Amino acid sequence: METPRKLDFDITLLTADELNSQDAKEFLLLVRDFGPKGILEPYSRTYSDGTKANIFIVMSVLEDGYQYKVPLKRNLTGDEAEAIVVEWAKFYDKDFDIEATSPVLRMQDLSMFDEVDIDENYEMLAHTVENSISHQRWMTDKVNEGWRYGMTHSSDDKVCPFLMPWEQLSESAKTKWIDNYANK
């Protein structure tokens, strides 16, 4: 099975005005200095002549402005991104937007979910919780309709032996309740 590719994370500055090289460098330094320690993750590029380069910021021209993307090791939390925005606003006096994004999983990345092992204990716990919630809802409805606990079931008297907390029912009572009332 092929190992899924690492997801790309970045912080992007969007502005109507093109930044000069010093301002672009300042944005990169703000991300480095006010973001989490070691957050930068440059893109590596190998040129046709075999030389390699690390790219720390990528500028793109958009229809309505410019985009400056800094690659990161992980996505930023809201507070981490906010710290960068605050510092950039102190430096840059024009309109801008900053987005901390990570792309959606690519289709080839989803292949890692083709086979999922579920621990049997976890699966049993999930079914128990699901049945407990369903039973609680069923009990609430019955009590609201005037039903009460009784040793034997009687529709005429509105009594039922299953009107007790799920945890207090015997295993055979739970099975009978599931067979007769669950998912109905």
Image (cartoon, grey):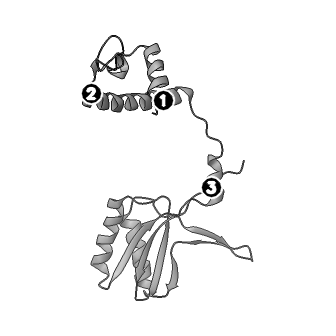
Q: Which residue is mark 3?
A: 109
- Vertical order, 136 against 172 (above or below): below
Q: State how far apart marks 3 and 1 are (Cα).
A: 29 Å
- Relative to the observer, which residue lies in front, 103 or 131? 131
- Vertical order, 35 against 89 (above or below): above
Helix or strand or loop: what does disc 3 sit on? helix
Q: State how far apart marks 1 and 2 are (Cα).
A: 24 Å
Q: Disc 1 marks which amino acid?
A: His
Q: Which residue is mark 2?
A: 143
- Relative to the observer, which residue lies in front, 80 or 114? 114
Q: Which residue is mark 1?
A: 127
Residue 11 sits in quarter: bottom left
- Relative to the observer, which residue lies in front, 59 or 99? 99
The answer to the question of whether label 1 and label 2 lie on touching residues, with beta carbons closer than 8 A, is no
Q: Disc 2 marks which amino acid?
A: Val
Dot 1 crowding, Cα within 10 Å, few <14, some 14–19, many 20+: few
